[in-house]
Image: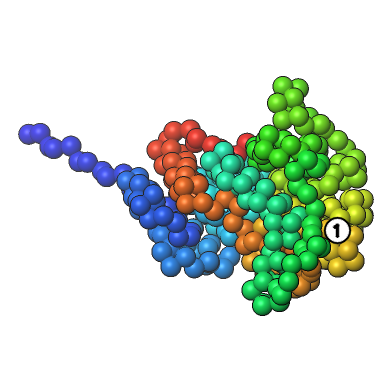
Amino acid sequence: MTHPQATVASPRLRVLVARAAFPDVLARLKDVADVDDTPDDRIETPEGLRLRMRDKHGAFITNSERIDTALLEACPALRVVSTMTVGVDHIDLAACASRGVIVTHTPDVLTETTADLGFGLLLAAARQMADAERYLRAGRWNRWRYDLFAGRDVHGSTLGIIGMGRIGQAIARRAALGFGMQVLYHNRSRLPDAIEQALGAQHRSLDALLTQSHHVLLALPYTPSARHLIGAAELARMQPGATLVNVARGGIVDEIALADALERGHLGAAGLDVFDGEPAVNARLLTAPRVVLTPHIASASIPTRRAMVQLAVDNLCAVLQGQPPLTPVAF
Ligand code: DGY
């Protein structure tokens, strides 16, 4: 007598989607795993995140979820953390690597959109667009004046870019090709000659860049050594009337020193998309003059945000299906 072979269904994989994102793009995850999603977009406390992640094989996160040793220790089944950001400063990469947890992120798809906003902040700050708009809306505009909100020129000036990765280079292209600017840059490593020539970009030490630029833009990754890279001494080295733009991470700038430099009038303007401890914003920056503030929206166009979610989902699916991730974080 023959017995039919018993079939044992393999257990379903489990994925946490820690924040809300385009539901139609997230839907693909359901093909490969049971999904614990967050349609109300609440942000979990560290304890809440631990409870929801402890039995998961994969996680879709943003920069509001901190992945650290304590969390990883509570999640023995975890194979992959997929963040829909290019920055990975919210993830302890060494702790992930030592537990064999793959980390993926979303480079490239957000480069041009982020560069657009970075350049937009430069224009808005140098030309005092935000202060001018508030003045007009407050009903204070009663006549044309020769020096009303007279700021600094952007075209034809010198832009110093700190952090010349993909986003820094995309901003350099806008500056050099669109606005006839001279581009200086400071980076861990020099760019190949061909790229320097195509961008007309010249490498400088940090000190030389600060003293030679009319406008300084930050586009570097946030690592421990980048904390307060721009403090009181660096701001003092910048030219009187210079502009500072930050589309990287808030902690790179000493915000109190920045507010001081704006209030004293040494710095001409600042354009900030990122803040130390965001979404809280230092009260001194809220009241400082000639500063344009946006709520971490540099990559926020609909097509780009969809592409970021799609890439994060594709990375998660690939790893859970035993394939190599598309865009792993190199460690
Ligand atoms: C990024 O992708 O790193 C953006 O700053 C959003 O966090």
Q: Is residue 53 visible?
A: yes
Q: Which image quarter is the N terminus in? A: top left
> Splitting the image into 4 quarters, where does residue 46 fall?
bottom right
The image quadrant that residue 327 belongs to is top right
**In the rendered image, is residue 227 in sight?**
no
| Spot occupied by residue 41 in the image (x, y as percentages of width and height) | 47, 65
Q: Residue at x 41, y 64 (%)?
A: 39
Of the residues shown, which amino acid type is indicated by label 1? Leu
Picture coordinates of residue 308, whole percent (x, y): 50, 46
Q: Is 259 placed above or below 324 here?
A: below
Q: Secondary structure at mark 1?
A: loop
Residue 125, image quadrant:
bottom right
- Determine which residue is flagged by label 1: 267
Residue at image point 75% right, 43% down: 155
In the rendered image, residue 61, in percent from the top left (x then y), is placed at: 52, 54
| Residue 11 appears left or right of 330 | left
- What residue do we see at 48% from left, 60% from top? 19
Question: Residue at 69% across / 61% down in the picture?
Answer: 129
